[in-house]
Image (cartoon, helix red, strand yellow):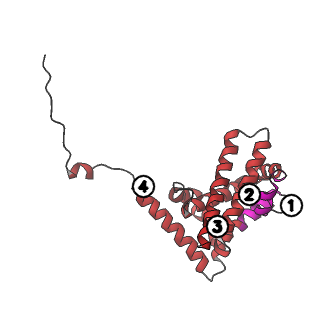
Amino acid sequence: MSRQHHRPMTPGAGFFAEIVGGADPALVTEAAERAALLLVRGARSSDDSEVAERLLRLADTEGIETIAEVWSGAPADSLAGCLWRLYLLRSWVHAEPVTVAREYDAGRVRAQVARVVAGVADPPGPEQLKTMVDEVLRGIATSDFADVLLRAAAFARVVATGRAHLADCDEAAVRRMLVMAEQLEAAGHAELLEQLQ
């Protein structure tokens, strides 16, 4: 029995035009970075005192899902990636302040330097942590961006240390928070170096 062989189809331009796909990842990354740059630059150059408050409440008004859609895929060392991590931390602190306070309290004795840099009021209760994380985000508009990143990194490091010493926290949760701390810290140091050039 003989098999008939067919020539492979050679797609023309029309073939590719009909394929429905997602957005070009390069364009999404570029748009995310541009939006982040405009947001930060606009907040810093504004004389309007309400800009910091609007920036702080961005996730509340637009939804963390909307922000995630734009920024969550951005590299950790990009402005968009940094903003994503900052808003993610804020959303978590506001959603689970009691858990955050417990984890932070467990880590603050063991991570003294990070505790001082984070700048949380003592004792670190749920309301104090919400206040601190809001101050950090307001800093995008009102203070040095490197300081914002380094404070957030220190906060995440204290939480990671606390998680590591609590019996009911799993290793993956500790690792996730530690990675976030390291990413924010590296971005903060890069920002400082850029300022010195």
| Residue 117 position by quadrant | bottom right
Mark 3 closeness class: few <14, some 14–19, many ≥20 residues within 10 Å: some
Question: What are the residue bounds of the magenta stretch?
Answer: 108-135
CB atoms of marks 2 and 1 within 8 Å: no
- The correct choice, above or below, for 156 with respect to 172 in the image is below
Kind of residue indicated by mark 4: Pro
Which residue is at 77% across, 59% downward? 129
The x and y percentages for residue 104 are 79, 52
| Front position in the image: 93 or 147 | 147
Q: Looking at the rendering, which quadrant does residue 127 occupy?
A: bottom right
**Pointer 3 with pointer 4, Cβ within 8 A:** no
Q: Secondary structure at mark 2?
A: helix
Q: Earlier in the sequence, mark 3 or mark 4?
A: 4
Q: Which mark is residue 43?
A: none
Q: Which residue is mark 2?
A: 155
Looking at this view, name the residue that lies furthest to the right.
123
- In the image, residue 110 lies in the stretch drawn in magenta: yes
Q: Which mark is drawn over residue 57? A: 3
Checking the image for residue 25, the label placed there is 4
- The disc, 2 or 4, on the residue closer to the chain's N-terminal end is 4
Q: Residue furthest toward the top?
A: 1
Assess whether mark 3 and mark 1 are in contact (beta carbons under 8 angstroms): no
The amino acid type found where label 3 is placed reads Arg
Label 4: which secondary element:
helix
Label 2 CA crowd tier, 10 Å (few <14, some 14–19, many 20+)? many
Which residue position is annotated with label 1? 122
In this rendering, the answer to whether 83 lies above or below 12 is: below
From mark 1 to mark 3, how far is it between C-alphas?
A: 25 Å
The residues tagged by marks 4 and 1 sit, at their Cα atoms, a distance apart of: 44 Å
